C-alpha cells in the first residue's frame, strides 16, 4: 500500500524558527563554530501565514522580500509580494527544513524552543 504525504495545518508551522545560511560544503559542526549575526536569524512564521520578525534577514539571503508562507506536503514554501513561491524548503525531519539557493548556499530552518 502506498503512503501519501500529509499536508500539515498552518498552526503546526506557526512560531519561531532559527534560519541559518551556510556554504555548500559546511558541516554542521563547522557551521556551529562560525555562527555570527550575518548568517543566523530568528524568523517568525505567523498563524495568518505571513512572516513577522526576521523577514528582512531572510529576504537578504533570498534576494527577494518574503511576505508569506504556506505548508506543502513535503515541506514549506516562502512567498513573495504577489503570493507566488520564491523559495521551497524541503522537510528533512520534524522541525528541520532545508533549501539550496541557486548560488549553492544553503538555508536551514529549525524550530526553536517555544
Image: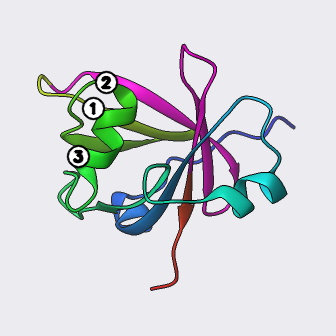
Query: Residue at left 12%, top 27%?
Result: 81
Mark 3 and mark 2 residues within 8 Å of each other at the beta carbon: no
Residue 62, visible in the rendered structure:
yes
Q: Where residue 7 sits: x, y (%)?
A: 50, 47
Mark 3 residue element? helix
Q: Quadrant of residue 89?
A: top right
As drawn, is 38 to the left or to the right of 75?
left
> Would you name the residue on which mark 3 appears?
56
Compared with residue 23, is residue 42 higher up or lower down, i.e. above or below? below
Q: Which residues are magenta?
A: 83-108
Disc 3 from disc 2: Cα separation: 10 Å
Using the numbered discs, state the Cα–Cα distance from disc 2 to disc 1 in whole angstroms.
12 Å
Kindly report which numbered mark, 1 or 3, lies closer to the viewer in this rendering. Answer: 3
**Is the C terminus in the top left, top right, bottom left or bottom right quadrant?**
bottom left
Residue 79 coordinates in the image, percent (x, y): 27, 32
What type of secondary structure mainly makes up the magenta span? strand
Crowd class of label 3 (few under 14; some 14 to 19; many from 20; radius 10 Å): some
**Residues at badges 2 and 1 in contact (C-beta under 8 Å)?**
no
Q: Nearer the viewer, residue 22 or 72?
A: 22
SS of the residue under disc 1: strand
Residue furthest to the left in view is 82
- Count the labels in the image: 3
For disc 2, the marked residue is: 63
Q: Is residue 9 left or right of residue 88?
A: left
**Which residue position holds label 1?**
79
Give whichever of discs 2 and 1 has the lower sequence position. Answer: 2
Q: Earlier in the sequence, mark 1 or mark 3?
A: 3
User: CB of mark 1 within 8 Å of CB of mark 3?
Assistant: no
Q: Position of residue 111 (x, y in %)?
A: 53, 68
Name the front one of labels 2 and 1.
2
Amino acid at each position: 500500500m502506498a503512503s501519501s504525504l500529509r499536508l500539515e495545518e498552518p498552526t503546526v508551522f506557526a512560531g519561531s524558527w532559527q534560519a541559518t545560511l551556510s556554504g555548500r560544503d559546511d558541516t554542521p559542526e563547522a557551521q556551529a563554530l562560525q555562527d555570527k549575526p550575518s548568517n543566523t536569524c530568528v524568523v517568525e512564521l505567523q498563524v495568518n501565514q505571513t512572516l513577522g520578525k526576521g523577514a528582512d534577514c531572510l529576504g537578504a539571503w533570498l534576494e527577494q522580500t518574503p511576505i508569506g508562507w504556506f505548508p506543502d506536503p513535503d515541506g514549506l514554501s516562502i512567498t513573495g509580494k504577489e503570493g507566488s513561491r520564491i523559495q521551497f524548503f524541503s522537510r528533512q525531519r520534524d522541525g528541520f527544513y532545508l533549501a539550496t539557493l541557486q548560488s549553492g548556499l544553503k538555508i536551514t530552518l529549525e524550530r526553536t524552543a517555544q
